[in-house]
Structure formats: structure tokens, C-alpha cells
Image (cartoon, rainbow, N blue to C red):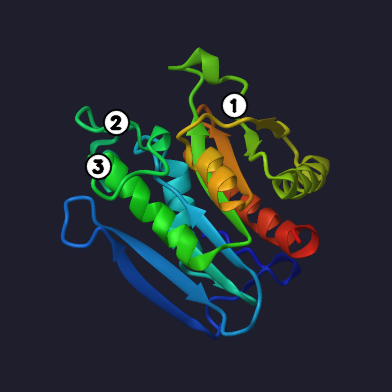
């Protein structure tokens, strides 16, 4: 477990105060998946972290799970570690019988299962109105050569605040990193969480894309580091 204790973004999990509450999206359905709210008890920003929109991208899911052992120093962090549980259990981007969740937003409450799941995730975001959404993904140029540009990048939503936050993160991270630097992209596709949350709810979204050619432990560490850096940048530059 990597403890993110830099700049007061998170408190030591042993000594931290606050509460954790857990509820289920789509309770009593085969798609039910937990939503955790880490509440510091101190006023501050709300951040939402989501992993597992695609079931074959394990680093984001593992990073989101590890965040549950920490507490924000102020404000709240809403975490959906495994958005698409059926895809994760199958180890697939999406099960063969479900459309791609990341092309189904904003979803429909009376649509197919994928659309219902997308609508329920949008409902959580509407409820908490986070200062930013951090969407954890992975790219695999080995199986999809077209994703080479996406690997090790931040995809910034068209909301101007996402650019301010993301570019600050890249500046500090790339100056400190001892390895491949991160780049940035924009214009997430229609139907993606990034595109639809930004366009419809006017909330900045940053998608973190690690490179599946790297070791899993390194990818998880990178995802955690990016969450920490984004949280700090939201506090300092996201208003």
C-alpha cells in the first residue's frame, strides 16, 4: 500500500478521524457495486474517483481499493472502485452481452443494463457535485496499437478547469518522475464519462491512462500518485 501523505492531501489511516459510509449502486441486481464515501468531517472539496469502467484495466481498480485505507485531510472523497463489476469478473473490457459502458453515458434509467449502470453513476455524480472526477483507466498498445498515444496520458475534459488542473499536475509530475513522462489529450469521445459529465454537469473530469506494458505494481503506484497530485491541484488551482 502506498500512503499518500504529501501536502496534507490525505491523513495517516491509523490516526485519521472521519467516517466511511458504503452504499450499493443498482442494489439487488447483478450489476450491484459499492460506492464508498470517505468523509474527513472537515469542510473542503469533494472529489470522485472511479475505477473499473472497463473490466480488463486492473490498475485503476486496485488503486481505488487502496484509497479506501486512507482519509482525506478535509472534504470528502467518493470512490467507486469497480464500476462495471460484471466486466471485472469476466476480465473483459465489457462482457460480450453488454455494450461498452464508456460509450453509454449519460445512460437511461429504463434502458439496457449498461445504460442503467451509466445512469446510476451519473446519479452519484449529480448527488455529490464533486469539484472534479478522476476516471482511472489503462491503455494496452500491445493489443491495440492505436492506443499508443493514450498510454501514460491524462485525458482532460473540455471544461477549462480540467486543463488548469491537469497541466499543473503534468508540470510537477514530469519534473519529478524518473521514467517515461506523461502527456495530455483532450476531446474524449461522446458517450464517455469524461465527455458527458463535463458537457452536461459542467464538472471537470481527468482520465488517467496508464500503460499496461508496465508492471502492475508500477501502474497502481502511478494511478495513486496521480490521484494525489490531482487532489492537490484541485485544492490549489481548481476554483
- Ranked by sequence position, the earlier of labels 2 and 3 is 2
State the image coordinates of residue 176 (x, y, percent, origin top left). 80, 45
Q: Is residue 195 above or below residue 35?
A: above
At a point 54% along the width and 67% down the height, the residue shown is: 77
> Which residue in the structure is indicated by mark 1?
150
> Which quadrant holds residue 93?
top left
Tell which of 67 and 20 is nearer to you.
20
- Ranked by sequence position, the earlier of labels 1 and 2 is 2
> Which label was assigned to residue 129?
none
At a point 52% along the width and 29% down the height, the residue shown is: 189
State the image coordinates of residue 160 (x, y, percent, origin top left). 74, 45
State the image coordinates of residue 39 (x, y, percent, origin top left). 52, 77
- Point out the frontmost of discs 2 and 3: 3
At a point 36% along the width and 46% down the height, the residue shown is: 118
Question: Looking at the image, do the residues carrying marks 3 and 1 touch, with CB atoms under 8 Å apart?
Answer: no
> Which quadrant holds residue 153?
top right
Q: Residues within 10 Å of mark 1 (few under 14, many from 20)?
A: many
Q: Is residue 1 left or right of residue 117?
A: right
Tell which of 142 and 217 is nearer to you.
142
Which secondary structure lies at badge 2? loop
Q: Residues within 10 Å of mark 2 (few under 14, many from 20)?
A: some
Q: Is residue 109 left or right of residue 38?
A: left
Distance from label 1 to label 2 (Cα)?
Answer: 22 Å
Distance from label 3 to label 1 (Cα)?
Answer: 30 Å
> Which residue in the structure is indicated by mark 2?
99
Q: Is residue 27 left or right of residue 73?
A: left
> Which residue in the structure is indicated by mark 3?
111
Which secondary structure lies at badge 3? loop
Q: Can residue 92 be seen here? A: yes
- Ranked by sequence position, the earlier of labels 3 and 1 is 3
State the image coordinates of residue 26 (x, y, percent, origin top left). 25, 58
At a point 50% along the width and 62% down the height, the residue shown is: 67
Amino acid at each position: 500500500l502506498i500512503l499518500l501523505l504529501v501536502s496534507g492531501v490525505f491523513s495517516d489511516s491509523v490516526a485519521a478521524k472521519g467516517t466511511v459510509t458504503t452504499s450499493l449502486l443498482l442494489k439487488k441486481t447483478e450489476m450491484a457495486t459499492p460506492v464508498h464515501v470517505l468523509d474527513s468531517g472537515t469542510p473542503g472539496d469533494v472529489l470522485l474517483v472511479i475505477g473499473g469502467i472497463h473490466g480488463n484495466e486492473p490498475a485503476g481498480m486496485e488503486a481505488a481499493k487502496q484509497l479506501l485505507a486512507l482519509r482525506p485531510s478535509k472534504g470528502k472523497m467518493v470512490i467507486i472502485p469497480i464500476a462495471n463489476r460484471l466486466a471485472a469478473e469476466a476480465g473483459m473490457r465489457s462482457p460480450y452481452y453488454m455494450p461498452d459502458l464508456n460509450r453509454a453515458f449519460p445512460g437511461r434509467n429504463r434502458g439496457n443494463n449498461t445504460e442503467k449502470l451509466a445512469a446510476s453513476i451519473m446519479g452519484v455524480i449529480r448527488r455529490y457535485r464533486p469539484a472534479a472526477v478522476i476516471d482511472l483507466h489503462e491503455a494496452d498498445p500491445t493489443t491495440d496499437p492505436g492506443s499508443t498515444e493514450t498510454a501514460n496520458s491524462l485525458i482532460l475534459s473540455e471544461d477549462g478547469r480540467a486543463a488548469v488542473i491537469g497541466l499543473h499536475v503534468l508540470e510537477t509530475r514530469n519534473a519529478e518522475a524518473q521514467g517515461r513522462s506523461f502527456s495530455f489529450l483532450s476531446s474524449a469521445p461522446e458517450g464517455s464519462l469524461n465527455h458527458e459529465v463535463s458537457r452536461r454537469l459542467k464538472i471537470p473530469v481527468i482520465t488517467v491512462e496508464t500503460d499496461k506494458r508496465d508492471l502492475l505494481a508500477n501502474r497502481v503506484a502511478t494511478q495513486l500518485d496521480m490521484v494525489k497530485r490531482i487532489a492537490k491541484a484541485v485544492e490549489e488551482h481548481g476554483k
